[in-house]
Image (spheres, coloured by chain):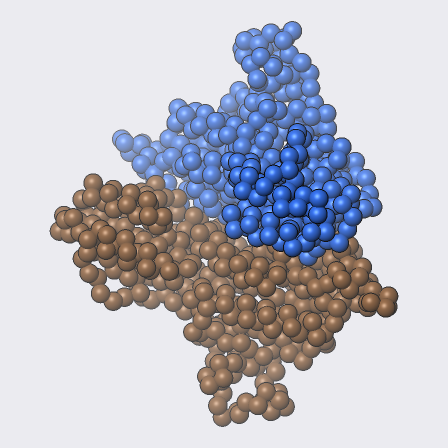
Chain colours: A brown, B blue
Amino acid sequence: MKYSKYFGQTKRDQKQYESKNQTLLQKAGYIDQLSAGVYTFLPLGLRVINNINTVIREEMNAIGGQEILMPALVQKELWEKTKRWDLDVPFKTALYDGKEFALGWSHEEVVTPLAKQFISSYRDLPFAPYQIQTKFRNEARAKSGIMRGREFLMKDMYSFHIDQVDLDRFYLEATEAYRRVFTRVGLGNVIYLTFASGGVFSKFSHEFQVISDVGEDTVYVSEEKKVAINKEVYTDEVLSELGVKKESLIEKRSIEVGNIFKLGTRFSQAFDVTYADAEGKKHNPVMGCYGIGPSRVMGTMVEVLADDKGLVWPKEVAPYQVHLVNIQAEEQAQRVYDLLQKAGVEVLWDDRDLRAGEKFTDADLIGLPLRVVVSEKTGDRVEVKARAGGESPIVGMEEMVKMVKKGEE
Amino acid sequence: MKYSKYFGQTKRDQKQYESKNQTLLQKAGYIDQLSAGVYTFLPLGLRVINNINTVIREEMNAIGGQEILMPALVQKELWEKTKRWDLDVPFKTALYDGKEFALGWSHEEVVTPLAKQFISSYRDLPFAPYQIQTKFRNEARAKSGIMRGREFLMKDMYSFHIDQVDLDRFYLEATEAYRRVFTRVGLGNVIYLTFASGGVFSKFSHEFQVISDVGEDTVYVSEEKKVAINKEVYTDEVLSELGVKKESLIEKRSIEVGNIFKLGTRFSQAFDVTYADAEGKKHNPVMGCYGIGPSRVMGTMVEVLADDKGLVWPKEVAPYQVHLVNIQAEEQAQRVYDLLQKAGVEVLWDDRDLRAGEKFTDADLIGLPLRVVVSEKTGDRVEVKARAGGESPIVGMEEMVKMVKKGEE
């Protein structure tokens, strides 16, 4: 894609927001704020989101998740069954005839009656539908950029099981799938499985927390065990139960990017969902739920990985793999562009008629993994430089394609 | 994918709805109604939607469209600028502090101020951002299944141009792109480019109407010219302008599946968007908008293509290409399944322990393009049958894979 024609380019005079992710992503042309907590994703930003979604889909499908798409308009009667209509969270709306809805901020009230239609016998279980869908939360404060939106993308999966044992089995598989997601998107080194409050049906829920000073949560981190404990359950009793010594823990600020939760039979009871066991006896299925916010993951990556020059995307989520920059030498650049496209590499070509310095500044800001520079100076060769740093060798075409393909692995 | 584990299977006792698409899609396990006009897409249904979206994306990208994603929460101030806050259409909601929003039912109020940020000179034009996004409409009546939702998917593209001439050029390209979309999804034979009311800035807008008795529109069709005229502009003056004779037209009911519209400068004026021409003189960009509802297209396909046994999907949108049915002969079926998967074919394998008749009935209902039957009778060979009808030869494995791959072309 040629950058001269790109919709959503870098801005010279970007306003500074409270949050680094918002400032950088707007400056670099990835997002645009419509109102506090409400954003448009521009082509570059949408490509990052789609890449994150692909990773999530692959890992959810790998543990048997099945993708569906539930609606945002959820009628009042359903929320009343679970006593969640009167919470602070929902945006509410109504039909002209008066029928009321809350915009879904979580989908237990939709997925549980849906699942009910397909459950009669123990042989119908387990299953785990999930969706990647737009959620709405009536947040009082929305100043953390795309880390906390009033409207935001969420992957929410719900699992249904004959008993606690089967839920526990799947819950562990989901935990591992979540680890793989965060590792693949480049947060593997900064993610901590975190013990948090579990509610009625389970002692703990589990969060995936990324250590960052801009986080809204406080956790106690055990570097040795690579786990953390959320402040909300940080008691002597819990420490002893988890076998963690107080002295080994360090208090940190962190960002919650994922959350998994054992729901027990709270929702299957509320909607009177039952299955018959082998003896014909009826039981409520045991449920779990599993959330990741793709837009929050994207914002977190900016907070954690960006440097003072701009964004730095790991290859698996980068909107393009190569930022091609030409300093004059347009014909040569066209050849390199065609060569890379032909090799199946996604290239953003800054073909604008600007000075080299401006192009380099923008390339650093946009943060694609590899920069390839073509100029009169490099002649038949090109300069290749990783955004993350290191050498910038001048190499031949074949070598360049090899380096790019290697970077993609 | 094995059907025994599939989330959202066929129903024996499906309620009959007013609309055929709703009844059939729910019976076959593609969708589920949450409330009137509000639907969940189950795995089969979501795969159809995704396939339709892929076709739309490819054709929009081919004419220079650039995909973005705008939010649903659109603040009151923006609607007031275009005097569209008080329309009947929107669902409205508010923050706890009182700030009001309408849920986007069209996005001129978002895309125009967005585009403004990236327009200063004539050199910045033209461009055409589009999105595939969930829209909300406060419909009084919502009984046409997924053809008319209160919440539904929409592809909406908006184009910005220096003048009417450039808009006209792009508008024609968009018309051709729309034709390609409808042809690829299998509606090419029943689609009519239809002259409809154009509003202030243009005499006509253009609709893409599919002839069907369940349609809500009335059009006058010229079979010879393969065009139609919407009742709303069916006057002697218009007929003479279009050079169409009244006697050659036939009145028909039809479903509007796409709509393209010249907006002129209505929105660029409302949001004070200007560009400077080569002499530095300021002008408002001229705009066009281009909509297709993927969920409405899906519903229309059911109305037009289904038969009395169930759904019939063209190959480009079918959720899977092959419905593998085994009558006992499980090991043989596993071999066929593995073979097809290895060949890159998407297979739904009905591996349930049911009688042949039940499996065949479900296969017809689900409507995948090709049915492959494995039984003791067929031995090392398989029976291949197209859902659309015709022969059902018994062939060897190699021949079967060839037939399937040919069907996919």
In the image, taking residue A382 as reference, residue A234 lies left or right, namely: right
Q: Is A308 or B39 nearer to us in this picture? A: B39
In the image, taking residue B382 as reference, residue A123 lies left or right, namely: right
Q: Is A191 or B284 nearer to us in this picture? A: A191
Residue B329 at x, y = what percent? 69, 51
Residue B51 at x, y = what percent? 56, 42
Q: Is residue A27 visible?
A: no
Task: State whether residue B331 is above or below residue B16.
Answer: below
Residue at image point 47% right, 35% down: B59
Q: Residue furthest right?
A: A280
Q: How many marks?
A: 0
In the image, taking residue A59 as reference, residue A7 lies left or right, namely: left
Residue at image point 39% right, 47% down: A8
Residue B355 at x, y = what percent? 78, 48
Task: State whether residue A169 is above or below residue B34.
Answer: below
Q: Quadrant of residue A274?
A: bottom right
Q: Is A407 or B143 nearer to us in this picture? A: A407
Q: Quadrant of residue B89?
A: top right
Task: State whether residue B63 is above or below residue A359.
Answer: above
Residue B80 at x, y = what percent? 56, 41
Q: Is residue A346 visible?
A: yes
Residue at image point 60% right, 35% down: B314
Task: State whether residue A272 is above or below residue B173.
Answer: below
Q: Quadrant of residue B144?
A: top right
Residue at image point 63% right, 16% down: B221
